[in-house]
Image (spheres, grey):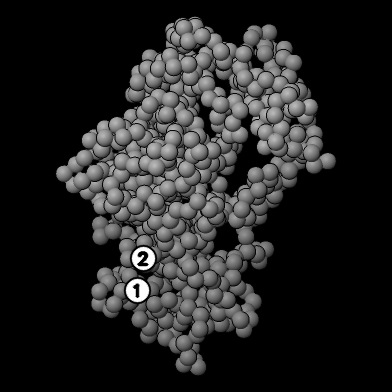
């Protein structure tokens, strides 16, 4: 034992590798320490002309789309970890592994999207692997575990396993108080499965029967014989294999038993000769089980490092919450620009370089923290500054007609820098042309003026950005006076007092390009979302669509065509926009997403325009939906779970129920499929939690 502790984890690494930078908690046992023989084999595999290779891995499960938290993991495993370790580029290797052990939740769509995201983020793995392609090796190792008496086939139902684990937790709590079995206060119950001591021969036969499909789903599973006396619940005889009659999206229907994540990921790390297995802090309690399995299979033991998860203000990364927002129609899909998925961020306009810089900038820590969303936007603005051409746009156009256009001796055109932040003469330019009619933004006009307001008002002079000055002479409105239809104005180089007004507003000429502006804002109304009321905290104005926005024609290419998707522009005073995939270049339809607002706050001269009737109606619908969600949550908190499937939308659907109130037969008396019952059980579990929490608050 002393010799093993002297060696310590990572004993195979070269002296120039700063392993202390990625070293976390040491186990009390020596399970995380390799043998000299394992070190020798590993070093022989990892020797290259440049020296000893150091290898990490990025192992997403293809059960959804990657999100910004995965971007942080990619950055860590492909780049930042090596920088911390002091490993030069020529000695770095990263394996991209699909951790595809759950065919029920996985599909080709997710596999393809993950591959696309990794490429788009700019990462090139040393090789790409699939856990499923190693199922034969994993099965052989499961046999080895059984033969050593360290695994058994268990016929307990999931509910019974959970009861045993609750007993094990109570026993662990009792031990922490100094109690021992036989004491009067020792909790009752046996934490162990009644099948735990089945013979090796019988377990080998039963496991083979599982493989041959002789058991229904949920009847039998292979469990690892770990430590039911541990204070770590992840040592409570975890499941290693379960029966699933589901075809696999990558390897087909060869198997009807599938290894669990807890059995697979550590073994795959060892088989792929990974040096550093990097994960997030919620997996820290799995450190014991990770090394227990490798120790009992006599496999290589990578170093494990846990880092804090990425938490960003106004954002949730919960797959369950995001999927619900898709299913309810709040989101348009996984690439909705409000989504924190990489595909959503890409569509919104964020660049891979900005996301990588953001991940690099926030670094890694073992302390939980909340990163401000503004930090990502600021990095993006810096990243795009030299490539996003400047031009003027108006979101809610108001027509302005000049009465003296032909007679006014004012400049009718001007060359404007595409990138005004560059030194004079170094930026390309575009021409801004003044026309007899222009369009200004409704935010820059009001019918009543005051001395703190610098926008346009009746009888008032303002400057046009890159143009002369104008004075509002007349305002034409709708019959009810609520909507401004047209402003009649005069032009002059300067007002009669020969002083340029403080206010300068952007505008679009009459030949400006009409486009659909999609304005995106925070997904939630609060920085830190409360899980109990998260739906009530949604920002129903996180997407505002304006179909009549206008932009200067300089946005067009030299051929007069619309810009291609993913082209960025900075609209002065409004924000950075990107051309959306819905743009039809040939058909002349331009759609643009606002990626980020400009850093500077709006000046006093800017006043939010009065909302249209349609926008007011949308507000009322949003408030009504929030009230409905609140009432529904209250009602569900008072609904006995056993009555869940006998009320509301479920009335008339089922004819028989089990003792817990879960339907077993449809209205016609036909038995429900196991998959349907499984889904109903999940719904029941949610209702039990909702009901229990509500009753506790009373």
- 457 w.r.t. 656: above or below: below
Q: Residue 652 vs residue 240: left or right?
A: right
Quarter containing the N terminus? top left
Query: At x 65% / y 19%, what residue is drawn?
Result: 160
Residue 575 in sight from this viewpoint: no
Q: Position of residue 421 (x, y in %)?
A: 34, 74
Viewer-nearest residue: 310 or 206: 206
In the displayed image of the protein, which residue is found farthest to the bottom? Answer: 497
Query: At x 62% / y 50%, what residue is drawn?
Result: 529
Q: Regarding mark 2 in the picture, which secondary structure is present there?
A: loop
- Chain-order first, disc 1 or disc 2: 2
Residue bearing the label numbered 2: 385
Specify few, some or many for label 2: CA neighbours under 10 Å numbering under 14, 14-19, or 20 or more.
some
- 49 w.r.t. 61: above or below: below
Query: At x 26% / y 70%, what residue is drawn?
Result: 428
Q: Residue 423 vs residue 261: left or right?
A: left
In the displayed image of the protein, which residue is found farthest to the right? Answer: 698
Q: Position of residue 546 (x, y in %)?
A: 51, 55
Q: Given contact means CB atoms under 8 Å apart, are the residues at marks 1 and 2 in contact?
A: yes
Residue 226 in sight from this viewpoint: yes
Name the disc covering residue 421, or none: 1
Quarter containing the C terminus? top right
């Amino acid at each position: 034992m002393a010799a093993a502790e002297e060696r310590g984890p990572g004993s195979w690494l070269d002296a120039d590798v700063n392993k202390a930078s990625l070293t976390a908690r040491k186990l009390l046992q020596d399970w995380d320490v390799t043998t000299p023989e394992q070190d020798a084999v590993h070093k022989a595999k990892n020797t290259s002309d440049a020296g000893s290779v150091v290898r990490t891995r990025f192992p997403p499960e293809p059960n959804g789309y990657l999100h910004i938290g995965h971007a942080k993991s990619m950055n860590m495993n492909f780049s930042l970890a090596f920088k911390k370790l002091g490993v030069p580029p020529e000695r770095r290797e990263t394996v991209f592994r699909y951790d595809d052990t759950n065919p029920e939740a996985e599909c080709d769509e997710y596999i393809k999207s993950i591959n696309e995201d990794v490429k788009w983020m700019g990462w090139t793995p040393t090789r790409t692997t699939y856990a499923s392609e190693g199922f034969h090796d994993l099965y052989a190792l499961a046999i080895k575990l059984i033969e050593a008496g360290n695994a058994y086939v268990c016929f307990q139902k999931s509910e019974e396993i959970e009861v045993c684990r609750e007993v094990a937790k109570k026993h662990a709590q009792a031990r922490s108080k100094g109690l021992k079995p036989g004491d009067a206060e020792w909790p009752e119950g046996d934490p162990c499965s009644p099948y735990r001591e089945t013979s090796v021969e019988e377990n080998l036969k039963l496991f083979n029967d599982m493989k041959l499909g002789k058991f229904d789903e949920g009847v039998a599973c292979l469990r690892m014989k770990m430590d039911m006396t541990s204070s770590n619940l992840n040592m409570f005889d975890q499941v290693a294999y379960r029966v699933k009659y589901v075809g696999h999206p990558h390897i087909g229907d060869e198997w009807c038993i599938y290894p669990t994540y807890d059995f697979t990921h550590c073994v795959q790390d060892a088989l792929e000769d990974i040096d550093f297995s990097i994960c997030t802090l919620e997996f820290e309690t799995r450190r014991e089980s990770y090394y227990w399995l490798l120790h009992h299979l006599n496999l290589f033991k990578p170093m494990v490092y846990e880092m804090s998860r990425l938490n960003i203000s106004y954002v949730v990364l919960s797959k369950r919450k995001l999927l619900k927002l898709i299913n309810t129609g709040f989101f348009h899909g996984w690439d909705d620009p409000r989504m924190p998925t990489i595909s959503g961020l890409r569509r919104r306009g964020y660049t891979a370089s900005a996301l990588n810089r953001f991940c690099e900038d926030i670094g890694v820590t073992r302390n939980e923290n909340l990163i401000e969303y503004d930090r990502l936007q600021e990095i993006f603005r810096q990243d795009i500054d030299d490539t996003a051409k400047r031009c003027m746009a108006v979101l809610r156009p108001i027509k302005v007609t000049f009465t003296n256009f032909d007679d006014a001796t004012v400049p009718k055109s001007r060359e404007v820098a595409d990138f005004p932040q560059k030194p004079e003469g170094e930026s390309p330019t575009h021409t801004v042309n003044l026309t007899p009619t222009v369009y200004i933004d409704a935010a820059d006009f009001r019918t009543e003026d005051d001395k703190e307001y610098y926008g346009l008002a009746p009888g008032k002079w303002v400057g046009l950005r890159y143009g002369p000055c104008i004075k509002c002479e007349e305002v034409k409105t709708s019959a009810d006076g609520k909507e401004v239809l047209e402003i009649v104005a005069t032009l002059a180089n300067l007002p009669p007092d020969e002083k340029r007004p403080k206010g300068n507003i952007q505008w679009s000429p009459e030949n400006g390009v009409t486009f659909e502006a999609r304005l995106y804002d925070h997904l939630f109304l609060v920085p830190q979302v409360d899980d109990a009321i998260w739906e009530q905290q949604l920002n129903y104005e996180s997407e505002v669509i304006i179909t009549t926005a206008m932009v200067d024609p300089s946005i067009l290419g030299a051929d007069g065509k619309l810009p291609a998707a993913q082209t960025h522009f900075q609209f002065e005073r409004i924000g950075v926009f990107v051309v959306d995939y819905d743009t039809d270049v040939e058909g002349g339809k331009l759609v643009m997403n606002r990626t980020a607002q400009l850093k500077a706050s709006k000046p006093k001269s800017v006043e939010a325009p009065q909302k249209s009737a349609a926008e007011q109606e949308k507000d009322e619908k949003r408030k009504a939906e929030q009230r409905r969600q609140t009432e529904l949550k209250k009602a569900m908190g008072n609904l006995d779970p056993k009555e869940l499937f006998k009320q509301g939308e479920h009335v008339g659907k089922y004819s028989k129920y089990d003792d817990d109130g879960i339907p077993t037969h449809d209205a016609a008396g036909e038995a429900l499929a196991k998959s349907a019952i499984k889904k109903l059980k999940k719904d029941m579990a949610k209702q039990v939690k909702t009901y229990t929490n509500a009753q506790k608050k009373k």
